[in-house]
Image: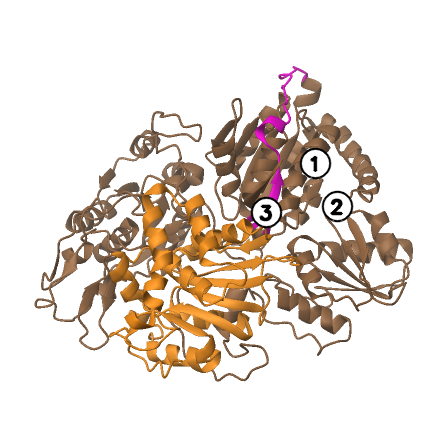
Chain colours: A orange, B brown
Amino acid sequence: MSANVILAGVGGQGAVLASKLLARAAMGRGLPVKTAETIGMAQRGGSVFSHVRVGEGTHSPLIGRGRADAIVAFEPAEAVRQLPFLRPGGMVVTSDAPVVPVSAATGGPAYDLPAIMSYLQECVGEKNLVVVDAAAAEAELGTARALNVVLLGAAARAGALGPVTVDDLADAVRATVSPRFLDLDLAALSIGDVFFRADKMGQACPRAYGTSSRAIWPIGPLQ
Amino acid sequence: MHREFLMGNEAMAAGALAAGVNVVAGYPGTPSTEVLETVARRRGEGVYVEWSVNEKAALEVAAGAAYAGARALVTMKQVGLNVASDPLMSLSYIGVKGGMVVLVADDPGPISSQTEQDTRTFAAYAKLPILDPSSPSEAYEMMGEAFVLSEELGCPVIVRPTTRVDHGYEDVEVADPEEWSRNEPEGFVRDPSRWVIFPALSVRAHASIERRDALLAKRLSGYARNTMTQTAGPAARPRLGVATQGISATYVAENLGEKDDVRVLRVATPYPFPEDLAADFLDGLDEVLCVEELDPVIERALVAACGRRGLSVKIRGKLTGDIQPSGENTVESVGRAIDAFLGKGEANEIEAPGISPRAVSQAEGRECLSTEKCPAPPTLPIRPPVLCAGCPHRASFYAVKKAMRGRKTLFCGDIGCYTLGNAKPLDMVDTCLCMGAGINIAQGVTHVEPDTAAFAFVGDSTFFASGITGVVNAFYNQANMTLVVLDNSTTAMTGHQPHPGTGRTMMGQVVEKVSIERVLLAIGLAVVETVDPLDHEAAVETVRRVADEPGVKAIIFRSPCVVLARPRATSAVDVEKCVGCQRCVRELGCPALVPDATTGKVRIDATQCTGCTLCEQICPTHAISGGERL
């Protein structure tokens, strides 16, 4: 079993930490892991990505374009930015909450969230797109700081992380996270269960988390 | 031994510790920084580690330790090697007694650097052996091998990882502390004929270095990390070869299939070049594709080998336009080049330089999902790196901008987070060259344009690294300019390393701080004023007053880095009072200020706001309040 996963977000969202958790979870299964990280200037609010390669037979820490099995994005525009790396039939798990850069307010391109979400839907296909309601997750956890772990949990549940399960991730959290954040991160992994249950959803919606009253793009029918 | 998931830089630190390193010095710089930090974290008793004031000092500390028989490691990024090159060039002639490894991290792309210089070329220039790892595990092993080689040859050995090796993670087999080698340094043995460089010594040393490197090149053909392999295609004797190195070797491996008939040479010691092995590789081949990053080092060496040995092999690579001449290689850029070389794909159209995956995906989202058709992607927001919300540098730049509005000015920047003051809306960096350069560049411009009010912005760590000599030069030579020290009491850009102004060392000692004010006063500056940049009115008033003083004068803007400090209380916008003028957004560009797309009113993102109060102080309707500055 192998998996090539790209984690994408904005500097400060915890992509490096999430990639370490994922790698640790895979190693807990006895699988070899390679990762490549963005470290340095781009971390100051820039686009960041981590490549995580799990399983035998890999050489390079970087994933080639069109060869990623999944993209896990902490920010929707960053999911689109990494799409060239996704293989046909690959899965995208993304947060619905945009991080609007300063440039959008100072003359740069505007942030067009509806266009970004419908593009994801069109390109990736509803079957392979999981949208996490970041506001609902924040309300549940009382903080937005564990969004990276929420996304990892959602990705594992959606089968986007190959052999890595939510239990593997929980083991990795217990092994690496400092006691101060342990409960928060374990809760962040488990809230997927809460949001996943159809009776909590109000509608049968296995691939979207929460009913999101603030959904401002047409997500269309979800099976 | 045990297995550990390590970053390349952590693996190299572990490798040095396993080899019994005694003394480690360096100056922070992406992508090299974590090596020394890891040594500091994992070191046992008796290992000395320091962040030096700059790379030249670090290299000299390591050299002194190696003179005394210690195993010494010095770490830096590629542009740091320029700073350290003066002692290194001479050290190449003098040599060392204990093993000395010079770890220089190169940055193809470049991703976080000013230049794309290739330390392999530098090694040939300095006549020092260099090892080029292709993975964290190999980098771990190479550290120990480099120390052994250095001791045997009596000269420093360079280990040259690149960003993808430095910042790639892998599970690495590492030695337990009980298994570490122990090195008991003999101490310095006085011998002027050995340790004092004079032309007579240099005449002898140069000749012996040339002899040594010729012999070493032969020996390195047998070094197990210089490899020649063959893919498992049907031909027993392939006609095509690929020569590669470092991380590019893994991209080659990703792209060669079982049916390809290709011989592969991987060069781990680009200098001295293992030419005998290369000749075996070239034997019987028609063409070779050289896949490497930065300079065409292997390509030139193979061309030379063909000429010297009268071999008729066509050598392709950067010089023939088959591989991009600059920028980072990627899995797919190498894939395209190999497919074209093997006649499997289209002719390889070299993309514009700088095709890091990030640049590619930013430039075009079109080819996604490789085979499935996708519409053109929507315009994505651009995310240049920005100063953090609440960063005191923003307040400093804004104060100078406001104070000097309408005047003829020059704003010379320098290397650090504050280079990001160039971004709109601040737009406050007119020049940036290299560490510490801004001070004398400002001086130089004023000799040509005396009516310009010239400012040089320099961070605290950069001031200590190479700013002080610049101030002495400007002061002594009667320049007329304002020095602005942006003192956030840390080396922020590279991850908050201590420096002489912080009062802490990497050994964990609390020491006397070197005072920037007292250094400047000792040089002779008559006006040295310190002000909190987040006190906006006072900051603007200070700039106005100081800038009109004659000669070289200094303002020290002192406020802690917000990444380290915990906010006390964040600011909030009173929506009743906010008129949606967005002055705060337009003037400050703080990422915590988020204008609403429909109402135009501004909201403050509480997860980012540090309560610096700068926006509170400039809001014309006093709609923002609640912050508490640090």
Q: Which mark is residue B145?
A: 1
The answer to whether residue B428 is left or right of residue B209 is left
Residue found at the far top of this picture: B190
Give the amino acid at mark 3: Asp
Q: Which mark is residue B225?
A: 2
Q: Which residues are magenta?
A: B165-191
Nearest the viewer among B372 and B539 is B372
The N terminus of chain B - image quarter: top right
Q: Which mark is residue B351?
A: none
Crowd around label 2: few <14 · some 14–19 · many ≥20 (10 Å) = some
Give the amino acid at mark 1: Glu
Residue B234: within the magenta?
A: no
Q: Are marks 3 and 2 on the same chain?
A: yes
* Residue B513, image x, y percentages: 34, 29
Circle 2 chain: B
Dot 3 corresponds to which residue? B171
Say if residue B602 shows up in the picture.
Answer: yes
Name the residue at 83% across, 38% down: B215
Name the residue at 50% across, 55% down: A37
Residue B182: within the magenta?
A: yes
The C terminus of chain B - image quarter: top left
Q: Earlier in the sequence, mark 1 or mark 3?
A: 1
Nearest the viewer among B200 and B88 is B88
* Residue A135, image x, y percentages: 27, 66
Marks 2 & 1, CB-CB < 8 Å contact: yes
Q: Earlier in the sequence, mark 2 or mark 1?
A: 1
Give the amino acid at mark 2: Arg
The kind of secondary structure element at disc 3 is strand
Q: How many marks?
A: 3
Classify B29 as above or below A56.
above
